[in-house]
Image (cartoon, rainbow, N blue to C red):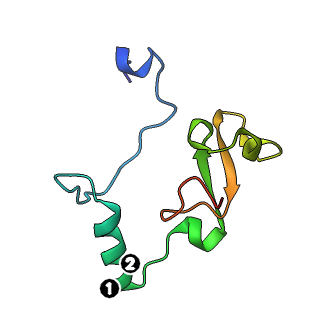
Amino acid sequence: VDTHPLDGGVTPPKVVHVDPFFLDAKPVTNKEFAKFVRATYYETEAEQFGWSFVLVSFLPKAKMAEGADVDPEAEHWVAIDGAYWRMPEGPG
């Protein structure tokens, strides 16, 4: 497999197949997503799990990141209880 400069010159670990999927022409707004949720009763994984990863720079209080679980390969993302699409930074 050839490398590409945008891959950082690293050979991908494996080649995978991705089935075709729909991609909208523009981002979905929170208002549009809320309408979808009301119509379908959709529940995101963050709502099911009760937490979501949040970018540290988005946290309203730095102390929220203290003691939070961090992925060692993505140290700027922390697991915040109660974070989901309606409260992307978590409660409070």
**Which disc is residue 39 wearing?**
1
**Which disc is residue 50 wearing?**
none
Residue nearest the observer in this picture, 77 or 22: 77
Q: Residue at 47% x, 29% y: name it.
A: 12
**Residue 4 visible to an observer of this rendering:** no
**Label 2 sits on what residue type?**
Val
Packing grade of label 1 (10 A; few <14, some 14-19, many >=20) is few
Q: Secondary structure at mark 1?
A: helix
> In the rendered image, which quarter is residue 22 located in?
bottom left
Q: What distance separates the C-alpha of mark 2 from that of mark 1?
A: 5 Å
Quadrant including the C terminus: bottom right
Q: Looking at the image, do the residues carrying marks 2 and 1 touch, with CB atoms under 8 Å apart?
A: yes
Query: Is residue 38 depicted above or below 50 in this figure?
Result: below
Q: Secondary structure at mark 2?
A: helix
Where in the figure is residue 27, as x and y percent of width and height? 26, 53
**Residue 74 visible to an observer of this rendering:** yes
**Which disc is residue 37 wearing?**
2
Q: Residue at 30% x, 57% y: name it.
A: 19
Where in the figure is residue 81, as x and y percent of width and height? 70, 61
Where in the figure is residue 60, as x and y percent of width and height? 62, 45
Residue nearest the observer in this picture, 28 or 2: 28
> In the rendered image, which quarter is residue 82 located in?
bottom right
> In the rendered image, which quarter is residue 72 located in?
top right
Query: Is residue 6 depicted above or below 28 in this figure?
Result: above
Q: Residue at 42% x, 38% y: name it.
A: 15
Q: How many marks?
A: 2
Where in the figure is residue 55, as x and y percent of width and height? 58, 41
**Label 1 sits on what residue type?**
Ala
Q: Residue at 62% x, 44% y: name it.
A: 59
Query: Is residue 71 depicted above or below 17 in this figure?
Result: above
